[in-house]
Image (cartoon, rainbow, N blue to C red):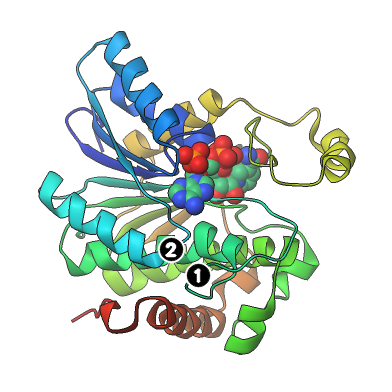
Amino acid sequence: MIIKDKTVVITGGTDGIGAATALELKRQGARVWIIGRSSEKGDRLVADALREGGVGSLNFLQADFSLMSNVSKTVEQLQDAVPRIDILVHCVGILIAHKAYTSEGIEKDFAVGYLSRFVMTKALVVQKLLDKESIVVNVAASSPKIPKMAKLEFNDLATVEARFGMQSHGQAQMANDLFSLEASRRWGLSVIGYGPGSVDTGIRRELPPLLVALIKPFFFFSTRKPQQVALQFAQMIESQSPPSGETWFFHKKGRFTPDAFVLDPNRRRELWSASEALEQKALGYGAYVVA
Ligand SMILES: NC(=O)c1ccc[n+]([C@@H]2O[C@H](COP(=O)([O-])OP(=O)(O)OC[C@H]3O[C@@H](n4cnc5c(N)ncnc54)[C@H](OP(=O)(O)O)[C@@H]3O)[C@@H](O)[C@H]2O)c1
């Protein structure tokens, strides 16, 4: 898909991978809408984009995506702002090692890093802002080779809800890969599941300093800059996006086939049920229904 003149929405677009991608796609002529929690960062990025000039545009919507009610409000704002979305990029996420639940009763890492993406994508499909011509890029760890993560099941809602900290972060990453596959199958979207590998961003800012220091050496030689990831995004969207109804997975070296635990249709069905139950818990009668 040619990026110029396309409408792009990026969740988690105020920092790290999302911010670099927003500026790159804007430079290539897209009309970009970024969503993030920090007004200061959002406004600064809009000012940077204006200073750069060029053909594209960049706009900012402030929202705290730990709450699904805010995700719904953002979808309403987008309904007023854009006729449809050509490219939706999900970069929103946090990394926490402590126990934290939102006021809607959802574990925070899972709420921000996965459930907000499920609720938003579903709402955009229901409101017809996303359609079979749209591309969704879902950034996650993508088919991680961590056996513990691979074993995480979604068949028991109580277990899904009880996970917290790093386990919940792993659960959000796993859920995103399963969701990437299921979103194309159910809604006919063209989906890219993307695992960026280690990227030099502030994603670890809420981890205890000792843990950060312990992790750092493992990624020292393989860490990339957000701008490198943004350039790969642009290239994937332009020349490697899947046809409607398919999901293709990529990491920094290119396209790959995910492992069997991601391809398992039962796990995807179980995740879907758990996601709808959590959406219902957060939004009550405000939950979206796909016709
Ligand atoms: N960096 C890596 O090595 C790496 C590796 C694999 C996967 N990933 C995944 O890639 C995604 C992007 O990560 P990143 O490294 O670019 O992280 P980042 O620099 O920390 O950026 C995260 C983005 O998410 C937004 N965000 C966080 N909490 C939010 C909330 N409650 N409501 C709305 N927006 C919120 C942030 O907005 P504000 O700044 O405005 O709060 C920011 O724009 C994450 O899902 C992460 O798990 C990253």
Residue 210 higher or lower than 249, as above or below: above
Which of labels 2 and 1 is toward the front?
1
Residue 236 vs residue 54, the one in the foreground: 54
Tell me the amino acid under the disc marked 1: Ser
Q: Are marks 2 and 1 in contact (CB under 8 Å)?
A: yes
Residue 209 higher or lower than 156, as above or below: above
Estimate how packed mark 1 is, as few (under 14), some (14 to 19) or many (20 or more) residues with alpha carbons within 10 Å: few
The residue depicted at 48 percent of the width and 59 percent of the height is 66
The residue wearing badge 2 is 67
Name the side, left or right, on which 12 lies relative to 108: left
Residue 179 vs residue 257, the one in the foreground: 179
The residue depicted at 85 percent of the width and 45 percent of the height is 211
The residue depicted at 27 percent of the width and 34 percent of the height is 32
Displayed quadrant of residue 241: top left
Q: Earlier in the sequence, mark 2 or mark 1?
A: 2
Query: Quick check: can you spot residue 251?
Result: no
Tell me the number on the disc at residue 159: none
- As measured in the structure, the alpha-carbon distance from the residue carrying label 2 to the one carrying label 1 is 8 Å
Residue 40 higher or lower than 149, as above or below: above
Which quadrant is home to the C terminus? Answer: bottom left
Tell me the amino acid under the disc marked 2: Leu
The residue wearing badge 1 is 103
Tag 2's secondary structure? loop
Determine if the C-beta at disc 2 is less than 8 A from ligand 1.
Answer: no
